Amino acid sequence: MRVSYSDGYFVPLPEGHPFPMAKFPALHRILLREGLIGNGDRAEPSPAGREVLRLVHTDRYLDELRTGLERGAERRLGLPWSEALERRSRLAVGGTVLAARMALEDGIAANLAGGTHHAYPDHGEGFCVLNDVAVAIRLLRGEGLLDRALVIDLDVHQGNGTAAVFAGDPRTFTLSFHGQRNYPFQKEASSLDVGLPDGTGDDDYLERLTAALPAVFLAARPDLIVYLAGVDPVAGDRYGRLALSRGGLHRRDRAVLRAARASGAALLLVMSGGYAASPEETADLHAVAHREARRVYGGAA
């Protein structure tokens, strides 16, 4: 499976900051070590330019990102603004666009970043600066490379920014499985929202997911599926409050990947959130989706 990755996905954050920036290079190392990707499978993205970002984001917000966010906007984002962070965010968007193109060519591809689903057109929040998934869908649709898209968002936090961007868009189906009482506390309306109580474990989670997927695929009829394979529903996650086991995470990713392959649509895998005890442990959980992709797609992955 080809992947988008750049060493520029990592930028330093202040000591003790809760966002696990080191998970991005750690995931790249794990996939290489396990032979899930080879050096020839890595594609280097370029930072998304302003005209591409304007497909989703406002000029005012892009200007603020370029020159520096005010303190209130920084607090809402949860990350300290810097020129390096702005470039890194554009690079991650470029990575999702590149991986989407590769997915349409190969049937499956991944960005080893992305899934920043809390970013709205006019602001960022929840560690999400720019909405890479929304930009990629709008860009490729504008180029005539896809018509219908399905966003399967299994991060523990509702994909509020993505839901807001595609509200009223009949060609983009947004599915969000999330903790009902978790952030964001003011939720948007996805095409289908499944809010889960705190402490939801493997069996309840998988039962609800496998029950929902057939109707979702029937309604969405996608050319491209974007899978936000967040690992923060796993028990012990700092911000998760759900209780999936590692085995449950494997079952979850396998169910989504099997449904995606059976649909015949291209699949784009992006990371989304995860806040385990260390960046390395978080990256190892993110690698589960890649291990299951090898199992489900075989040589195609």
Image: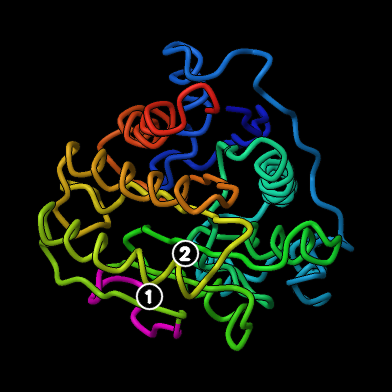
> Can I make out residue 163 in this image?
yes
Front residue of 100/75: it is 100
> Can I make out residue 84 in this image?
no
Residue 236 in the image: x percent, y percent? 17, 46
Q: Toward which corner of the image does residue 258 lie, by quadrant?
A: top left
Residue at the spot x=69%, y=42% of the render?
Answer: 95
Q: Is residue 113 left or right of residue 41?
A: left
The majority secondary structure of the magenta stretch comes to: loop
Q: Residue furthest bottom?
A: 168
Placement of the N terminus among the 4 image quadrants: top right
Question: According to the image, label 1 marks what residue?
Answer: 184
The disc at residue 126 is: 2
Residue 248 in the image: x percent, y percent? 18, 44
Q: Which residues are magenta?
A: 179-189
Residue at the spot x=45%, y=48% of the render?
Answer: 262
Residue 70 in the image: x percent, y percent? 66, 71
| Mark 1 Cα-neighbour bin, 10 Å: few <14, some 14–19, many ≥20 | some
**SS class of the residue under badge 1?**
loop
The disc at residue 28 is: none
Sequence-first disc among 1 and 2: 2
Q: Amino acid at mark 1?
A: Pro
Residue 198 belongs to the span the image colors magenta: no
Q: Is residue 281 above or below residue 81?
A: above
Q: Are marks 1 and 2 in contact (CB under 8 Å)?
A: yes
Q: Is residue 116 left or right of residue 82?
A: left
Residue at the spot x=45%, y=66% of the render?
Answer: 217
| Mark 2 Cα-neighbour bin, 10 Å: few <14, some 14–19, many ≥20 | some
Q: Amino acid at mark 2?
A: Gly
